[in-house]
Image (cartoon, rainbow, N blue to C red):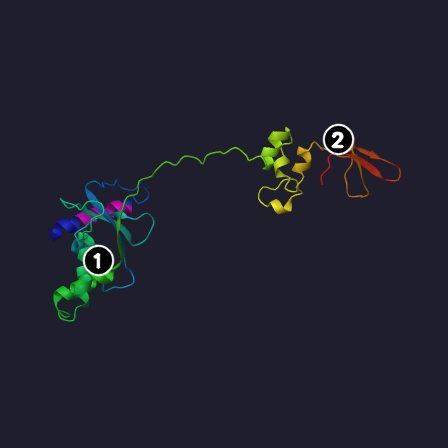
Amino acid sequence: MNILWAILASIALSRSAVFGTTLPAKRFYDTHNYYVLEQRSDTTAAASLTEVARSLGVEIVERAGELEDTWLVRTLKPEFEARDGEDTLDPVLSAFENLRLKASSPFVARSEEAISARQIVSAVSFLERQTPAELVKRAPPPIRPPTPTSAQGVANRLGLKDPLFTEQWHIINDEFPDHMMNITSVWDMGLTGKGVVTAFIDDGLDFDTEDLKDAFVCRPTLLCTFHGLILG
């Protein structure tokens, strides 16, 4: 039996070394339980990976991706496994816990069995059973119609065609309402600024721009009148 475990471990190690960059080995969760085992590499007195696998009763599958000293191991599922929600002892984890108890027991401290247990325990820094998670395809979040007071809702209601209207946070601010000019109620009253002449005394306006030049009437005194909306 020891020779068989050594052969299986050698095959698994060779496969991982040669095909380390290929796709992971196929999993058989219906028939096997899988575990991640991290081998401690900072001690020379610890047992080898083959000895650890033999003591825990697992088969080495392959290295876990690009993680050094981390291995995927497996064992056949028990013939009768507990149903969902029922407490049961995992045979591999139980075997490791028994080795830990044996390694720390003062009654058999010098026995060969205790020495072997300490070597196995000192070689393993992490051991955990892997539970497959079913991937569920999630639907995209539902697209809800804009509220009447939102920027898009106001644009739809008033027939505004400006593609950048919803980005003009100073007019309607959906995220921070306290920062907007709160003028939609004026627009709803029919006060759009049509026919109203406003004047700016400012040299910071580009009245030659394509969007505004037709709305400006500038005097020689640099006083310009602007025909537009009442903004507040």
List x then y, in percent, for residue 162.
Answer: 65, 31
- Location of residue 220 (image quadrant): top right
As helix, strand or loop, the secondary structure at mark 2 comes to: loop
Looking at the rendering, in which quadrant would you find the C terminus?
top right
Residue pointed to by mark 1: 48
Residue placed furthest toward the left: 1
**Which amino acid lies under the numbered mark 1 shown in the image of this protein?**
Ser
The residue carrying pointer 1 sits among few (fewer than 14), some (14 to 19) or many (20 or more) residues within 10 Å by Cα, namely: some
As helix, strand or loop, the secondary structure at mark 1 comes to: loop
Q: Decide: is 70 above or below 104.
A: above
Residue 123 visible? The answer is yes
**Which residue is at 68% across, 34% downward?**
187
Residue pointed to by mark 2: 194
Q: Which residues are magenta?
A: 8-17
The residue carrying pointer 2 sits among few (fewer than 14), some (14 to 19) or many (20 or more) residues within 10 Å by Cα, namely: few
**Which residue is at 18% across, 65% downward?**
103
Left/right of residue 189 with respect to residue 67 in the rendered view: right
List x then y, in percent, for residue 63.
Answer: 28, 49
Between 37 and 213, the one nearer to me in the picture: 213
* Mark 1 vs mark 2: in front: 2
List x then y, in percent, for residue 48.
Answer: 21, 57
Circle count: 2
Whether residue 16 appears in magenta in the rendering, the answer is yes
**Which amino acid lies under the numbered mark 2 shown in the image of this protein?**
Lys
Q: Decide: is 82 above or below 98.
A: above
Q: CA distance from mark 1 to mark 2?
A: 87 Å
Residue 51 visible? The answer is no
What secondary structure prevails in the magenta region? helix
Q: Earlier in the sequence, mark 1 or mark 2?
A: 1
Residue placed furthest toward the right: 220
Left/right of residue 34 with respect to residue 174 in the rendered view: left
Between 230 and 130, the one nearer to me in the picture: 230
